[in-house]
Amino acid sequence: MTCNLSDNPVHCSLNINGNDVEQVESFKYLGTVLDQKLRFNKNTAEVTKKARKRLYIMNKLYARHISVPLHI
């Protein structure tokens, strides 16, 4: 890893076995989204978005009196 002390550690270059490691802002690992500082903000937003979509569909079905078995 090559960095100056004054550099932001997020922008340091990392080299393993002669290969540069790509730096990304966030990534998904085992279904969980992590960012550079190992925060879960993006993961929480993604889970919330999925839940809202499913609740919207469930509300529409309920409003039309359609029963669908839930698989939990």
Image (cartoon, rainbow, N blue to C red):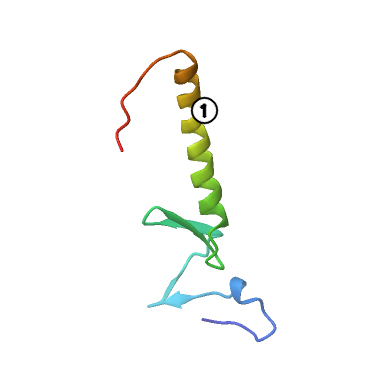
Is 62 placed above or below 9 here? above
> Which residue is located at x 51 percent, y 27 percent?
56
Q: Picture coordinates of residue 70 (x, y %)? A: 32, 30
With 4 as the anchor, is 23 left or right in this view?
A: left
In terms of secondary structure, where does tag 1 sit?
helix
Is 52 placed above or below 44 here? above
> Which residue is located at x 58 percent, y 75 percent?
12
Give the residue furthest to the top: 64
Mark 1 closeness class: few <14, some 14–19, many ≥20 residues within 10 Å: few
Q: Picture coordinates of residue 71 (x, y %)? A: 29, 34
Between 25 and 68, the one lying in front of the other is 68
- Check disc 1 and report the residue beneath it: 56
| Quadrant of the drawing holding the C terminus | top left
Q: How many marks?
A: 1
Between 30 and 9, the one lying in front of the other is 30
Between 42 and 53, the one lying in front of the other is 53
Q: Picture coordinates of residue 36 (x, y %)? A: 55, 66
Q: Find residue 28 and report its image quarter.
A: bottom left
With 59 as the anchor, is 18 left or right in this view?
A: left
Give the residue furthest to the bottom: 5
Three-letter amino acid code of the residue under disc 1:
Tyr
Q: Picture coordinates of residue 7 (x, y %)? A: 67, 79
> Which residue is located at x 49 percent, y 31 percent?
55
